[in-house]
Image (cartoon, rainbow, N blue to C red):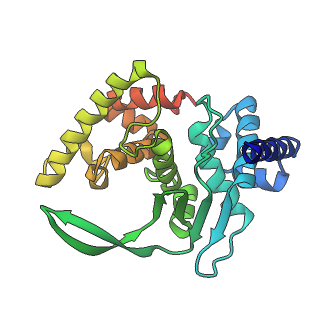
């Protein structure tokens, strides 16, 4: 009991310290050129800046393979992580996440594949990963997507996984009100199944080419990919998949098109 009380005291003291900090102008300089930051109103900017400081001071940022982590990386990764939670009322600032590991270039990982009971180990080139209490970001790719936005954003993708896991399962269903659960699972499962069938045949992609084959891997990846599309290409997502757009708008409690 004493340990829990002491930990709670330390956490409150740290949060009070962070709350008293000013947001440095040098940090804001990294944000000014970002589309998502420029579209926020004054209140939203103040809120996300406070969230960025809390995130930066509560997570460990580590450079892999002697890669040096700088403030630009910390601020921009923190911004996109906090953007996802900006309008969601929660005290959870990715509390289960401890470490962000940053690589300069893509890395190969080993992955065990199960094909009908036959297990094999294959190597995959990754641009990011979310696992346990750690997020991996490949900075070379992330930086290109930030400053040359199109449809993809690996930071949004990996932190969508973190949000998905906040209820203890990574299944494409993030924590939400019970009243929204049925419609969410119905809409996303239906679109995932359609994408999965198309990917298996590898033809007649139509509008599903916009979402892409990787989203057909499983429903967790589907949620992460459509989160990228929602924030990076909202008009296209709404035009091609209005039901998906509406579900994401309801969950994230924001409308990127209006912004």
Task: Say left or right for 87 vs 158.
Answer: right
Give the residue at x 46% y 45%: 165
Give the residue at x 62% y 55%: 77
Across and down, in percent, residue 7 comes to 75, 47
Across and down, in percent, residue 76 comes to 65, 55
Establish if 24 lies above or below 259: below
Across and down, in percent, residue 17 comes to 86, 46
Task: Say left or right for 37 vs 114.
Answer: right
Is any part of residue 20 visible from this angle? Answer: yes
Is any part of residue 32 visible from this angle? Answer: no
Give the residue at x 54% y 29%: 254
- Image quarter of residue 56: bottom right
Establish if 244 lies above or below 158: above
Task: Say left or right for 8 vs 120.
Answer: right
Task: Say left or right for 226 vs 160.
Answer: left
Nearer the observer, 29 or 224: 224
- Image quarter of residue 124: bottom left
- Looking at this rendering, what residue extends furthest in the front direction? 1
Across and down, in percent, residue 225 comes to 39, 48
- Looking at this rendering, what residue extends furthest in the top direction? 179
């Amino acid at each position: 009991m004493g340990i829990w009380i002491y930990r709670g005291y330390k956490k409150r003291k740290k949060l009070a310290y962070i709350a008293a900090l000013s947001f440095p102008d040098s940090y804001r300089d990294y944000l000014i050129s970002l589309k998502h930051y420029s579209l926020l109103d004054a209140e939203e900017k103040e809120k996300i800046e406070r969230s960025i400081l809390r995130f930066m001071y509560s997570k460990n940022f580590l450079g892999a393979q002697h890669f040096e982590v700088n403030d630009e990386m910390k601020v921009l990764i923190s911004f996109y992580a906090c953007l996802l939670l900006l309008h969601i009322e929660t005290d959870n600032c990715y509390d289960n996440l401890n470490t962000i590991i940053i690589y300069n270039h893509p890395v190969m990982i080993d992955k065990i594949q199960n094909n009908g009971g036959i297990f094999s180990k294959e190597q995959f080139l990754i641009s990011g990963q979310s696992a346990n209490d750690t997020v991996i970001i490949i900075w070379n790719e992330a930086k290109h997507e930030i400053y040359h936005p199109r449809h993809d954003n690996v930071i949004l993708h990996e932190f969508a996984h973190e949000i998905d896991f906040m209820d203890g399962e990574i299944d494409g269903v993030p924590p939400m009100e019970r009243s929204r659960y049925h419609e969410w699972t119905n809409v996303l499962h239906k679109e995932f199944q359609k994408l999965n069938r198309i990917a298996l045949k590898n033809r007649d992609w139509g509008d599903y080419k916009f979402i892409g084959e990787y989203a057909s891997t499983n429903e967790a990846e589907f949620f992460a990919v459509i989160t990228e599309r929602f924030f990076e290409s909202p008009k296209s997502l709404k035009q091609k998949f209005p039901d998906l757009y509406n579900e994401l708008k309801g969950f994230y409690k924001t409308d990127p098109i209006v912004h």
